[in-house]
Image (cartoon, helix red, strand yellow):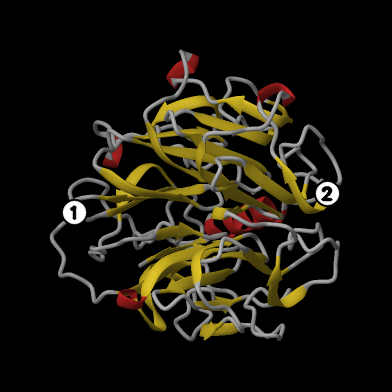
Amino acid sequence: MNSLSGAIPGNRRRAAAAAAAAVGVALTALMVGAGALPSAAAQPLRVKTWGDNDNGQLGDATTTDRHTPVTAAGVTAADVTAVAGGLNHSLALLANGTVEAWGDNNNGQLGDGTTIDHPTPGTVTGLLSVRSIAAGDDFNLARLGDGTVQAWGDNDFGQLGNGMVDPDNPLPAPVTGLTGVVAVAAGQDHGLALLANGTVKAWGDNSSGQLGNGVTGGNSPVPVTVLGPGGVGVLSNVKAIAAGDNHSVALLNDGTVRTWGDNAEGQLGNGSVSPGSPTPVTVVGVGGVGVLSGVKSVAGGGDHTLALLISGAVRAWGNNSFGQLGNGVTGVDSPTPVTVLGPGGVGVLSDVALIAAGDNYSIAYLTNGPVNTWGLNSVGQLGDGSTTDRNTPAGIRTGLIGITSIAGGGLFGLAA
């Protein structure tokens, strides 16, 4: 997201983060060292969550914020193949092809036919044979084994892709006309689908051109085709997709990255800051030199973007108001990729296996075990036992190991 200023539609995350940050200033911080972590006993293989819990999105049967990971009730990681975080709700994909959901349900995003919040996981009604999931602010996508997509929750911008803007739908229903889908991603109020032929479809809010169809403004309640750079042809040879609040990201087969949509904080990574681009642009290299290449996976935060390199290092660009780029700087946005530093700013973060981004913070899981986080920490979303913002990675002390999936929600994190 998964995954935050002005009066334009689709900035609820950013406003929520700013409000939480203001509260966080008054909190007493428990400092946790960012260097080498003490050895910790392995945790039981359960879904772990941390951070904001106002709507029960941590799944621990409370609405108490947690500054270190807690266990989501009733879900074991042995059963879980993926997790996803929305603004204030969580999803877990089980090995049997069903989906569990918990947290905020104001728009029916828990998929149980009601709009009642739940602080513990419950099964999404009627979903079977699910292969991958994605969570937007208040809506969700599920890719089925037959290559179709189901959506449920908020539909204010047509993000359910069912041909209508409103009403919301508290039960899963098909996205119109999608077949051959191999991956899905969700922004604040827009959806993306990667097709087996390497092209991308998009639908929902298009206020910043995040649908990539050459148009800025309005919305599309049915999928449209993402165009090629400059609007020429169709974007192709895509192997992975991600979405931030109002921007979209595509990783190509050659290891380079294309982005489109909102660029007010430089989150497109093309060396400029602008209102945005309604067609894909190329992410440049560090310092604006050349083209970013050798990328293995991508993640979209609120207004920042992450790229995991084949080498195990991480690049970041866009909004850096809270240090979410991890380059040792706070408050200076970067429209070109920067290198994420090692814990405490020593060296370079390396041996990274998985990346994720929330609203103004970032998460990385290292091959040798530790989960590292950096950026905004107003309600403990870094999971390091404090409420101190960090502009370089810090390790979560609770010994999260054996992780196969991580996700960033609005102001909380998940791992399984």
Q: Secondary structure at mark 1?
A: loop
The quarter of the picture where residue 134 lies is: bottom right
Q: Residue at x 46, y 75 (%)?
A: 97
The quarter of the picture where residue 249 lies is: top right
Query: Left or right of 58: which side holds 81?
Result: left
Q: Earlier in the sequence, mark 2 or mark 1?
A: 1
Q: Nearer the viewer, mark 2 or mark 1?
A: 2
Say if 372 sits above or below 45 in the image. above
Task: Give how far across and how far down residue 387 sits, in percent.
Answer: 44, 58
Q: Secondary structure at mark 2?
A: strand
Say if 309 sits above or below 274 in the image. below
**Marking on residue 219:** 2
Residues 100 and 384: in front is 100
Res. 52 in view: yes
Q: Residue at x 58, y 74 (%)?
A: 54
The quarter of the picture where residue 105 lies is: bottom right
